[in-house]
Image (cartoon, rainbow, N blue to C red):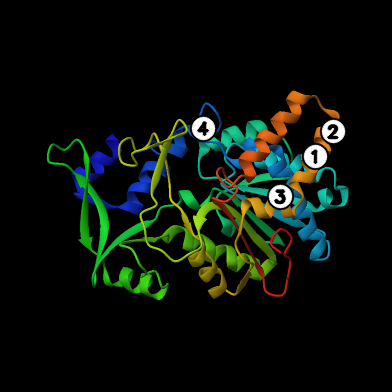
Amino acid sequence: MNKIINILREQKSMPIDQFIDVALYDKKFGYYMKKNPFGKKGDYITSPLISNLFGEMLAIWCVAFWEHIGKPKKILITELGPGDASLCKNLLNTFKNFKSFYKCVEIKLIEKSNKLKRIQKARIKNKKVKWIKKINELNCGPIIFLGNEFFDSLPIKQIYKKENLFLEKHITLSKNNKKIDFLFKKAKKNLIKNIKKLDLVNKGNTIEYPIVAIKYLKIIAKKIKKYDGALLTFDYGYIEKKNQDTLQSTRKHKYSNVFKEPGNTDITHHINYKLFSKILKRNKLEVEKIVSQNEFLQKLGIIERANMLSKKINFRAKANIYYRLKKLLHYREMGDLFKVLLAQKKGTKFSLGFR
């Protein structure tokens, strides 16, 4: 909190995207830079941690994609924000069962946090895995970009629309200089122009503009167009057009106040999948229909795989498999809330898990 208070004392206010960036990614103060937020002892749990079957299904999808594009001699899997490396570990374990593919694959992990990088390197000892800082370091392909709960933690701007007036949401210090208050400043002309160009002015007052995610999508699209490949990403989000404040914070597996303990809590928002599709299509990629995590995983055969594994194990182990599967698939858990997006080079026509 001290870091943010110091900045506010100096510059009086900061827009929401700057607040999120400092709270999550500041080198010393940032949430992801100083702790491991994953698992029971952390603040939240992700699909790869819930069940190894999630990573196994993604690995099979990657192998099928490689086969579909003609089994190139080299293929890169690039994971965006690999967390505690659980997904990468599961991918490698499954890839080893497909010897021809395993010979061709290289894995690149894009990680900003040195703290998480140390955790990842301790868990993965494999020459096929390398760490990079930026997507621009990738200079060959094809490339499959994988993202699980990556885009939802990138900084966003929030613009409040009142009749024909657009106001950007900022934070400022309260009168006693100890708490955070909100401040609305007239949005800059360029910002208004951009949100109108993206058709973000819909029903509802709060417009969320994922300025950093858009930059990532454009760079990813450029690499896929140049080297071939695809983007497969999982995040919670919505498909219908709507404007609302989706900013939320989690601590110890419970929702918390976004502005109460910045630097010590996770901050995320819901993905506007209509917007993501639009950005990717404008950048000359083909986008499959958006499906739920439930639909995607079921089409890949996750239930059949669970049934196969449960045949030779005791009741307790079997119950554990299906309990974890329910968390991934049930509409009240992650099954419907999480959506899956696939973007690929025009003419690739790969649709496993989507049709």
Q: Quadrant of residue 197?
A: bottom left
Q: Position of residue 189 (x, y in %)?
A: 27, 72
Q: Which residue is mark 4?
A: 36
Image quarter of the C terminus: bottom right
Foreground mark, 2 or 4, reads: 2
Q: Quadrant of residue 176?
A: top left
What secondary structure is marked by label 4? loop
For residue 10, above or below residue 34: below
Image quarter of the N terminus: top left
In three-dimensional space, the C-alpha distance between marks 3 and 4, rounded to whole angstroms, equals 24 Å
Q: Which residue is mark 3?
A: 58
| Dot placed on the residue nearer the N-terminal end, 3 or 4 | 4
| Dot placed on the residue nearer the N-terminal end, 4 or 1 | 4
Q: Position of residue 237 (x, y in %)?
A: 50, 55
Q: Nearer the viewer, residue 276 or 338?
A: 338
What secondary structure is marked by label 1? helix
Q: Around disc 1, counting alpha carbons within 10 Å, would you say few (fewer than 14), some (14 to 19), or many (20 or more)?
A: few
For residue 53, above or below residue 339: above
Q: Which residue is mark 2?
A: 311
Residue furthest left in the image: 175
